[in-house]
Image (spheres, rainbow, N blue to C red):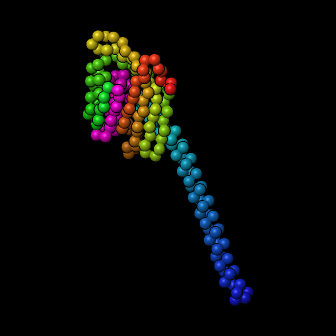
Amino acid sequence: MNSVTSPIRSSFAGLSRSVALAALIAVAVCSVSQDKQKAANTNAGSVEEEIKQLISIYAKAADEADPTLASRVWCDSSEDSLINPVGRWQGVEQIMGFYRHEMGEMYSARDLKISGVSVHVYSDAAWAEFNWDFSATRRKEGSSVSFDGMETQIYRKNRDSWCLVHVHYSALPAEKKAGTE
């Protein structure tokens, strides 16, 4: 080995080791990233099912005009909100009042049917979209009413479980059905 090629060979050997180490790190990072993505995708399915279960409880709470049952779904926060064509309710007290007054006092019987549920999960936030059909009997005159509509619900992860933080729903005009343009 002469004095000219020795530093070059030494630098080349060091560079080769650096490139090999960088390649190993890249492979390891990609592998961990793929494992995390697979775990997230697997977890997303269970989160979707958990949120669909919350939507079922939400519908039952509407059917029964039951604020106690509804409180199992909502986040119990001043940030909770519900918006529909009739008004806006902000905070858990107002929303529970919606179940008592707008649902319980206005209607003697209620039947909320939900269909076409689609759930989208992003880390500690999620939203659900669905169609609904609401049939009820007015308490005052005993007449039947029926509305079709669409709804969006926003959920957030609250410690180890999911809770509902926002609902926005709209009734469709009588001549339209949910799922149409």
Where's residue 62, x and y in %?
Answer: 35, 25
Q: Is residue 68 visible?
A: no
Position above or below: 165 against 98 = below
Report the magenta residues as a range. Answer: 58-85
Q: Is the N terminus in the top left, top right, bottom left or bottom right quadrant?
A: bottom right
Residue lying at the far bottom in this picture: please name it: 3
Residue beneath the point at 39% across and 29% down: 169
- Where residue 75 sits in the image (x, y, percent)? 34, 38
Q: Residue at x 48, y 30 (%)?
A: 117
When the figure is inspected, residue 136 is found, relative to residue 26, above or below; the finding is above
Residue 61 is covered by the magenta coloring: yes
Q: Is 163 on the left or on the right of 130, as rendered?
A: left
Q: Quadrant of residue 96?
A: top left
Q: Residue 116, position in %: x, y? A: 50, 27
**Res. 141 image quadrant:** top left
Q: Residue 167 at what x, y percent from top left?
A: 37, 33
Q: Residue at x 26, y 24 (%)?
A: 101
The residue lying at 57 percent from left, 58 percent from top is: 29
Which of 51 and 91 lies nearest the eye of the viewer?
Answer: 91
